[in-house]
Image: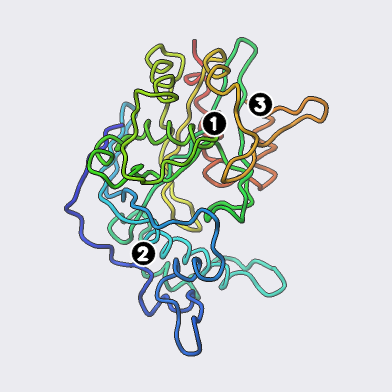
Amino acid sequence: MELEPDDRAARPEVTGKEDFADHVRPLIDPGRRFHRYSHAVRGLDHPRLFENRMLWRLLDISWNAQAGYMAFGDTSYFEQVDVCEALAHEAAASLISADGRVSPATWKGLGIRRRLGDPFDLGSRALGTSTDTLTIRRDRYGATFVLHDRNAGNVAVAGGMLHVMPCGVFQPSSISQAALAADFSLWRNIMREYSEEFLGNPEHDGDGHPIDYSAPPFDMFEQGRSAGKIRPYCLGFGLDALTLYGEILTTVVFDADVYDTLFGNMVDANEEGTVVKTGRVHPTSAIPFTEHTIRELIGSKRLAPAAAACLQLAWQHRHTLLAD
């Protein structure tokens, strides 16, 4: 994947602050609404992890069988929330009746979505992205993967759903110039998420000091990748149909010995939720990577859309991913 910075982009055409988005912003007092959807969330129902940090804004993307290309500018987390979460709120208000029935989707009542037009027009809004990573452990007996049950009280996105693990917004660890340059990498973003979600390390949240990627645990990830025992793949890119969040769909395949060394003390819970365990007598986080399991999970309708996409694409390309 080739990534290129681009600081020439025009401001988004739709920001969520316009008059046609008034109906999704609650009243702050009689006759006056919140100016931004993110401010309403922060003021009325604040998830524990909800900070307005810088993130990279996707401006261009191309894709073929051999490689991919992405160009990024910059935006902020709240700029994304102001549009993406407003789209979801608008759809719920328009399509779900008071008794819980869901009506067929129409453009009626979806004013923000209609103004955005083509969802693949990357100039129309501030489109941040997340790296959603399916983690696969491979040994001579087969392959397993890990799922995360996301706590709706802690996270702003995909709360109460099962997701692949790790996942996180594609953003620098700090606003320092050194961090902006060093962190502009999908692989380093994924490594940071492993450090936080699998190992329980504090979030790399912009304290001003760039990360030393030659120090543990990052050096162990790099050594495993150099040895061919850790193999990251980019499966594709998608837009969540409800929110239009951007999702960079990835998977990392670990040989069992390296996985067990890195994650022998994997946490049962982290700041975003709990690791899914199966089995009553001997609970395990290792879920069989089989067609039956994937079909059952997708049929349960508990999977986040990006998680379902990762699993389906990984199964489609399993012979490449699990080749010796």
Q: Give the CA separation, mark 1 to mark 2.
A: 42 Å
Of mark 2 and mark 3, the one earlier in the sequence is 2
Dot 1 falls on a residue whose secondary structure is: loop
On screen, 23 above or below 74?
A: below
On screen, 286 above or below 149?
A: above
Look at the numbered discs 1 and 2 and tell me whether their residues touch, using CB distance below 8 Å. Answer: no
Q: Which residue is mark 2?
A: 117
**Residue occupying image coordinates x 47% and y 89%:** 31
Q: Which residue is mark 3?
A: 286
Q: Which mark is residue 284?
A: none
Q: Give the class, few, some or many, for how many residues have Cα within 10 Å of label 3's Cα (few <14, many ≥20).
A: some
Give residue 126's position: percent from left, percent from top: 33, 58
Dot 3 falls on a residue whose secondary structure is: loop
Q: Is residue 228 left or right of residue 2?
A: right
Dot 2 falls on a residue whose secondary structure is: loop
Of mark 3 and mark 1, the one earlier in the sequence is 1
Q: Give the CA separation, mark 3 to mark 1.
A: 16 Å
Q: Amino acid at mark 2?
A: Gly
Look at the numbered discs 3 and 1 and tell me whether their residues touch, using CB distance below 8 Å. Answer: no
**Residue occupying image coordinates x 33% and y 29%:** 212
Give residue 265's position: percent from left, percent from top: 60, 25
Q: Give the CA separation, mark 2 to mark 3.
A: 42 Å
Of mark 1 and mark 2, the one earlier in the sequence is 2
Numbered disc total: 3
Q: Give the class, few, some or many, for how many residues have Cα within 10 Å of label 1's Cα (few <14, many ≥20).
A: some
Q: Amino acid at mark 3?
A: Ala
Give residue 10's position: percent from left, percent from top: 20, 60
On screen, 319 above or below 178?
A: above
Give residue 3's position: percent from left, percent from top: 26, 37
Q: Which residue is mark 1?
A: 199
